[in-house]
Image (tube, rainbow, N blue to C red):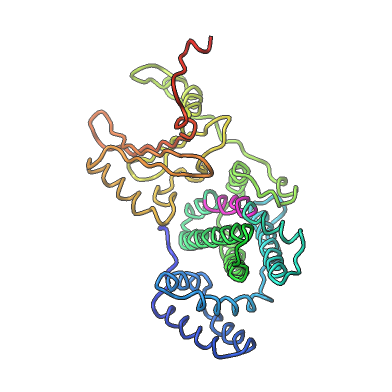
């Protein structure tokens, strides 16, 4: 599956500029009618991307707010939270659709609370709802992670690549909008005066969510149900549970499926794998790799994921599920970094480099990421290993602590 990005051409940006001029000239009724007519044949995600580009090209705050005001009125009666749920409770698709309803409801309530706070009619409940919005967005990431790391790979196995690629591109836009809202909420709490922009951003998010969930409910999920068999759904449900359901989904979403446990790892040579420096049973190899204070992912020479470690007793830094085994490594990274991943792999294959090293700040932690090529005894390229480590504590080390200090 090729990763996609949302495109917005010059023609759409030109139409947006013309629309703003129309909105400036008419009253509220004319503005709403003009905006509805404009949005009828357009994808909200393409409009959102066009607005982002226009802002970067010098569109003023006044221009943006004219469009936002019309957008807020447009969203008054648009919703996708009354869909008939597919499949039985506990089925992965049923759970995803339930989460659609809960996410839409929470964002709609946030929009209403922001409106009341803007007019001075809000109460402590409204303020608390706004302050909790960022943590709600964080919790809702489990929904998108289960789609990206389990559902999409299974669809790819059945030859369905276009819709998942588009949905993932839309996830990236949704995350960008959520971050924008979180910043505006923090600004509001610190005494800022961006309430009108906050209301607009939440209305835009609601519009994007409605469009996105409609596509999933009416296109992506029916496709999945038509090609994925019952044994695969059982395996997917187990992998869903490893990532975890969103906390706002009722208990019955945790029930209804028999979980299939993967078979024991295969072994060779009478139960042992013979290595140059020792002999290990498959179970011992698994324990050893999982006990390392790092996360390991192995990608073969065909650029497909072959293995990842499952650290025991601690939370993973990056989400991994068995569904990614056999997946192109380029499809396991955000769109904005795919070209860099491709370049690194090509450099490894051509022996231009023997390591790629990065470090990022993530959730209050300093995360170190290292890629190295794997070569066999003949020097032939056999793939790449990614090693990820939380080095927050390591960076704080001072002085010495010797082994004898434990005595």
Q: Is residue 220 magenta?
A: no
Query: Residue at point 63% right, 86% down?
Result: 28
Using the image as rendered, state which of residue 27 and residue 47 is in the foreground. 27
Using the image as rendered, state which of residue 194 and residue 230 is in the foreground. 194
Vertical placement of residue 338 versus 21, above or below: above
Residue 30, horizontal then vertical, whole percent: 61, 89
Q: Main secondary structure of the magenta part?
A: helix
Query: Residue at point 50% right, 70% down?
Result: 48
Quadrant assignment, res 349: top left
**Left or right placement of residue 69 versus residue 7 in this view:** right
Residue 217, horizontal then vertical, whole percent: 62, 64
Using the image as rendered, state which of residue 107 and residue 94 is in the foreground. 107
Which quadrant would the N terminus be assigned to in this image? bottom left
**Left or right placement of residue 123 versus residue 217 in this view:** right
Query: Residue at point 71% right, 54% down?
Result: 88
Query: Residue at point 67% right, 71% down?
Result: 79
Q: Which residues are magenta?
A: 136-148
Using the image as rendered, state which of residue 219 and residue 9 is in the foreground. 9
Q: Is residue 314 visible?
A: yes
Residue 161, horizontal then vertical, whole percent: 46, 59
Residue 244, horizontal then vertical, whole percent: 63, 45
* Mark count: 0
Q: Is residue 266 visible?
A: no
Vertical placement of residue 354 versus 228, above or below: above
Vertical placement of residue 380 versus 159, above or below: above
């Amino acid at each position: 599956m090729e990763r996609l990005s949302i495109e917005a051409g010059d023609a759409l940006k030109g139409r947006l500029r013309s629309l703003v001029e129309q909105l400036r000239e008419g009253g509220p009724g004319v503005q709403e009618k003009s905006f509805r007519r404009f949005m009828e044949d357009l994808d909200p995600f393409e409009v959102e991307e066009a607005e982002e580009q226009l802002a970067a090209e010098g569109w003023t705050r006044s221009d943006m707010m004219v469009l936002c005001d019309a957008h807020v009125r447009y969203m008054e009666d648009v919703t996708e939270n009354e869909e008939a749920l597919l499949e039985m409770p506990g089925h992965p698709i049923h759970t995803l659709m339930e989460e659609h309803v809960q996410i839409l409801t929470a964002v709609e309530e946030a929009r209403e609370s922001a409106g009341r706070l803007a007019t001075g009619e809000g109460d402590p409940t409204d303020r608390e709802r706004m302050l909790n919005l960022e943590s709600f967005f964080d919790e809702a990431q489990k929904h998108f992670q289960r789609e990206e790391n389990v559902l999409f790979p299974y669809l790819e196995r059945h030859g369905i690549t276009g819709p998942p690629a588009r949905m993932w591109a839309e996830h990236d836009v949704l995350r960008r909008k959520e971050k924008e809202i979180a910043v505006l909420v923090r600004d509001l709490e610190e005494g800022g005066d961006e309430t009108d922009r906050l209301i607009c951003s939440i209305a835009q998010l609601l519009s994007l969510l409605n469009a996105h969930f409609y596509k999933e409910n009416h296109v992506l999920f029916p496709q999945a149900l038509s090609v994925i068999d019952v044994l695969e759904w059982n395996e997917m449900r187990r992998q869903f549970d490893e990532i975890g359901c969103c906390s706002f989904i009722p208990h019955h979403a945790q029930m209804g499926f028999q979980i299939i446990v993967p078979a024991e790892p295969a072994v060779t040579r009478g139960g042992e794998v013979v290595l140059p420096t020792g002999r290990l049973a498959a179970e011992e190899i698994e324990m050893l790799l999982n006990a390392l204070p790092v996360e390991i992912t192995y990608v073969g020479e065909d650029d497909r994921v072959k293995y990842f470690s499952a650290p025991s007793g601690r939370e993973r830094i990056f989400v991994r599920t068995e569904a990614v085994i056999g997946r192109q490594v380029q499809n396991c990274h955000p769109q904005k970094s795919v070209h860099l991943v491709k370049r690194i792999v090509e450099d490894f294959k051509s022996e231009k480099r023997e390591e790629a090293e990065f470090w990022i700040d993530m959730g209050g932690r300093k995360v170190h990421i290292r890629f190295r090529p794997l070569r066999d005894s003949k020097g032939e390229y056999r793939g790449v290993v990614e090693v990820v480590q939380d080095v927050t504590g390591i960076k704080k080390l001072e002085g010495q602590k010797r082994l004898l200090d434990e005595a």
